Image (cartoon, rainbow, N blue to C red):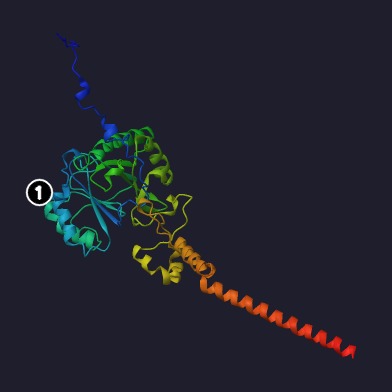
Amino acid sequence: MSSVPETGATDISTEPPVVDDNVKFGFLRKEMYTEKLAGTAIAYDRHVILCYKTHETWPSRVESSDSHPLPKLLAGALKARKNDIPVKTLLTICEGREGTELSDGDVLLFPEMVKYRGLKESDINSFVDEVIVNVKPWSTGVQETMTGSHVFVCAHNSRDRRCGVCGPILIKKFKEEAELRGLKNVSVSACSHVGGHKYAGNLIIYSVQDEQVCGHWYGYATPNDVPALLDQHIGKGEIIERIWRGQMGVPPVKKAQKAVEPTLPNGNDLEVNEIDNRTNGIKEEKEKENVGGCCQGANGFSCCRDDEKTEIVTETEKEVKKPAGKLDFLTKKWEQHEVFTTAALVVAIVTVAVAYSFYKRSR
């Protein structure tokens, strides 16, 4: 009679292992640092940020949700007037908390660094027409000028769990480190989807650098990066190249020269559709060389035209220096034959002349 040992414990081998959120969705996930970040930011020239509720309440598509009419109506009005808007405009939602500096309905504009208080559903069309399309102050709104630096961290959990895990941790760390440094001019807020959840933690920093408002995107940011982002980026205006994704006003195929790795050549400020014109565009490129901008694009793609011109020249040189073909070989052989024949004829003439001279003397 066989017996089954009684262990008094459940066999856990068949149970699914418990995976830490930080390993599966957070800063220890396998995909961290697996892709190049430079050039992965969205191309835009103006950022409209609507303050609306908290990130825990946002549905996956908050800008199109019937349950959230304010962001939906603003997104719809911007889309309806997109052909009238003079610059490429990006809409994002950030948290608005009553009793704080950012309340529901407040609208932030970058690079203007302007805040309009209390946008209501009934005011959306006039706001879009006056402020976004015609780039004028809003006639019925209260305008405030913003100062300091503004950090927006993607914490859109219902859109992607990775940002839901990483975002709140980064926000907490930013606030703690800013308080330790006594930085009262740094605002930190949760925001909705900004593109590239696989790069979480994602964040955008708007600050004044060299008397200009700059918006820089970072990805794969961890709590360990927060001190450097505060001290170097916000404090000194130095880009943290290792986690830099791009910036406002620079298309994905471009990159600020500051953030170009030293091993990369300097590029020209060229649009993508100019690549097709490279064979007859050397003069045009020379005219654009001093514009500045990027070289390294998304996923390491290089739009550097200096390299392409070098390659064109190299290919031309190869055509000139290419090995001789069969016809060239025969031509060279024939030329050699003619030389040998001529030499033999000269020798024969000289020999006859010498022989004739001896004959004359013998007589």
* Residue at image mark 1: 66
**In the rendered image of this protein, does residue 269 appear above or below residue 7?**
below
Q: Is residue 50 left or right of residue 306?
A: left
Q: Quadrant of residue 17?
A: top left
Q: Percent from the top left, x then y, of residue 110?
A: 29, 53
Describe the element under mark 1 as helix, strand or loop.
loop
Q: Quadrant of residue 10?
A: top left
Q: Residue furthest left?
A: 66
Residue at 61 percent across and 77 percent down: it is 335
Q: Percent from the top left, x then y, of residue 345?
A: 71, 83
Residue at 21 percent across and 21 percent down: it is 12
**In the rendered image of this protein, does residue 44 appear above or below residue 324?**
above
Residue at 17 percent across and 11 percent down: it is 4
Q: Which residue type carries mark 1?
A: Asp
Q: Is residue 240 visible?
A: no
Q: Is residue 347 left or right of residue 191?
A: right
Q: Is residue 204 visible?
A: yes
Q: Quadrant of the N terminus?
A: top left
* Along the viewing direction, whichever of 346 and 100 lies nearer the viewer: 346
Q: Residue furthest front?
A: 363
Total labels: the figure holds: 1
* Along the viewing direction, whichever of 86 and 355 lies nearer the viewer: 355
* Along the viewing direction, whichever of 342 and 272 lies nearer the viewer: 342
Q: Residue furthest top?
A: 1
Q: Is residue 326 left or right of residue 128?
A: right
Q: Percent from the top left, x then y, of residue 102?
A: 23, 43
Q: Residues within 10 Å of mark 1 (few under 14, many from 20)?
A: few
Q: Quadrant of the C terminus?
A: bottom right
